[in-house]
């Protein structure tokens, strides 16, 4: 049996799913294959739950209607507060989404067995007299300018109905606003590129990564480095093991391009924190790192923490050797099932960092594993209810405000970088620099740099 294929292009589908707030569309009916017939339409589309009906005309318009309520053949009106008409493409086939919400919910759909899809008792009606044709009128159910919808071309070259699945796992609009454009990516890069800590004695700020083993600390540095290199890199060794893959304290700078200047940010990678006492990163070592005593490539040894006689111990660290901001890196898939002892260790660690007055930002990694939609399109990050839930759980478990948590997806399986993901990574870095600046405000005796 031949598979019935959607007429929508990838781009059209992306705009449609944005309008609908759901990624999963299952094609139920296609006029050119199943026939332009009201009875076939009802046989295939009745009692299917939320659906989207799409009409294509010869002038390049793509338009239709969404209903949360099922189509039926009752011969009566059905109420639907969420129903809307829409246009996906307008004149000359230009993508220009337009949404016309239902005005009188009680008459959102007219469900009659002898008629095709009928929104609002004739506001938009398809399969008129069992043909590939539409009829429209602006009425009390949907009030709109009919020409905007279809350019006054009521002949159809196709009509499709899709079941809209998983609608409840996605929010209607994102709860944090992000601009997903290449300009925005460039703007963020430029902001980070030109970032300078405003104290004279400080050429670069130091951002420390802390978090459980396997959370994505090393991968986050690799991701930032990748964005500025223009392709995926893996300078820091990342991977999965029962104990921390990172065993040395490493300080990394990021160059703006292969031969470019280093950024004014040093990323400090550590060994992961473990549930068991006596293994993984120890709190005493964290104190030494924050104060600036720990040299690059220091080999962590849980059996004995760094002391003043250890090789390379920085005896009199200055502000430039110290940590100015902490990124607590948390695996978004594991936070809900985090063992109690590990949760306690993380809290202790946060308390220690707080004692030093160092600001903290939580990077919630692996958001692509939390919500499968994000594997296809990272733009859904602030629309996914699952991601929002894990962020709230993280806030609760770590006792940190939601405003101090940002989601990221590290580069680990891909070979090339991509704009939307870069934006999420760069937004996190910008937030870290802002927090570091707020820490530097504690040093008012230092002369600000000339701007
Ligand atoms: N899907 C997905 N996998 C990730 C992400 N970040 C990291 N990983 C994977 O998670 C594993 C651990 O990543 P690392 O960066 O080594 O974690 P780490 O926190 O440095 O771990 P330790 O050094 O062992 O403490 C690796 O296999 C990565 O490929 C992410 O955002 N999404
Ligand atoms: Mg690591």
Image (cartoon, rainbow, N blue to C red):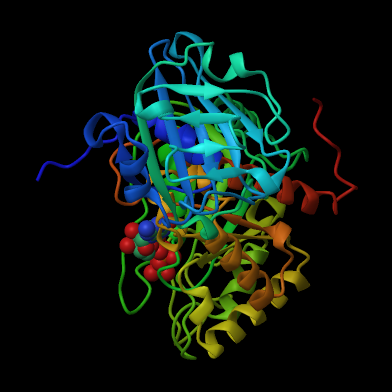
Q: In the depicted view, which residue is nearer to us: 374 or 62?
A: 62
Identified at 73% across, 62% down, the residue is: 358
Residue drawn at x 32%, y 49% is 44
Q: Residue 158 in the image: x percent, y percent?
A: 33, 25
Give the percent coordinates (x, y) of residue 207.
60, 54
Q: Which residue is outermost to the right?
A: 445
Relative to residue 303, is residue 356 depicted above or below?
above
Residue 247 seen in render? no
In the rendered view, does 310 fall on the left or right side of 400? Answer: left
Residue 90 visible in the shown view: yes
Task: Using the rendered view, name the quadrant where residue 143 is placed.
Answer: top right
Give left or right: position of 326 versus 351. Answer: left
Whole-percent x, y for residue 274 in the image: 46, 82
Front in this rendered view, residue 170 or 292: 170
Q: Residue 337 at x, y = what percent?
A: 49, 81
Number of marks present in the image shown: 0
Kindly identify the residue that appears in the image at 58 percent across and 33 percent down: 85
**On screen, 237 above or below 449?**
below
Which corner quadrant holds the C terminus?
top right
In this rendered view, identify the residue nearer to me: 401 or 22: 22
393 over 444 or under it: above or below = below
């Amino acid at each position: 049996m031949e598979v019935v294929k959607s007429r929508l292009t990838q781009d059209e589908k992306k705009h449609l799913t944005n309008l609908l707030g759901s990624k999963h569309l299952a094609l139920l009916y296609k006029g050119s294959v199943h026939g332009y017939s009201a009875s076939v339409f009802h046989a295939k589309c009745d009692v299917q739950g939320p659906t989207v009906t799409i009409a294509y005309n010869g002038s390049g318009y793509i338009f239709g209607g969404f209903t949360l309520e099922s189509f039926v053949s009752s011969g009566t009106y059905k109420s639907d507060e969420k129903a809307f008409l829409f246009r996906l493409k307008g004149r000359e086939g230009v993508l220009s989404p337009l949404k016309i919400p239902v005005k009188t919910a009680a008459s959102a759909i007219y469900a009659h067995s002898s008629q095709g899809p009928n929104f609002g008792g004739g506001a938009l009606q398809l399969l008129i007299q069992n043909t590939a044709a539409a009829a429209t009128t602006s009425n009390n159910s949907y009030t709109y300018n009919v020409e905007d919808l279809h350019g006054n071309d009521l002949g159809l070259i196709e009509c499709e109905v899709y079941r809209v699945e998983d609608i409840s796992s996605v929010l209607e609009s994102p709860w944090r606003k992000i601009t997903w454009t290449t300009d925005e990516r460039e703007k963020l890069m430029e902001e980070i590129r030109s970032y300078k800590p405003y104290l004279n004695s400080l050429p670069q700020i130091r951002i420390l990564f802390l978090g459980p083993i396997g959370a994505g600390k090393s991968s986050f540095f690799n991701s930032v480095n990748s964005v500025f290199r223009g392709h995926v890199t893996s300078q820091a060794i990342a991977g999965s093991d029962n104990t921390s893959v990172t065993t040395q304290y490493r300080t990394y700078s990021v160059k703006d391009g292969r031969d470019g200047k280093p950024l004014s940010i040093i990323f400090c990678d550590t060994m992961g924190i473990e549930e068991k006492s006596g293994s993984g990163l120890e709190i005493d070592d964290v104190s030494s790192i924050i104060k600036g005593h720990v040299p690059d490539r220091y080999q962590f040894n849980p059996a004995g923490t760094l002391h003043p006689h250890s090789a390379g111990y920085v005896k009199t660290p200055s502000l430039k050797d110290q940590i100015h901001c902490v990124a607590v890196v948390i695996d978004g898939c594991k936070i809900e099932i985090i063992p109690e002892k590990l949760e306690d260790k993380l809290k202790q660690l946060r308390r220690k960092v707080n004692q030093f007055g160092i600001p903290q930002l939580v990077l919630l990694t692996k958001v692509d594993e939390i919500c499968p939609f994000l594997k296809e399109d990272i733009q859904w990050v602030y629309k996914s209810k699952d991601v929002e839930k894990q962020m709230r759980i993280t806030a609760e478990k770590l006792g940190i405000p939601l405003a101090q948590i940002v989601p990221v997806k590290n580069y680990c399986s891909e070979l090339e970088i991509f704009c939307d993901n870069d934006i999420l990574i760069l937004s996190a870095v910008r937030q870290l620099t802002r927090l570091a600046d707020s820490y530097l405000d504690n040093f008012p005796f230092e002369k600000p740099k000339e701007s």
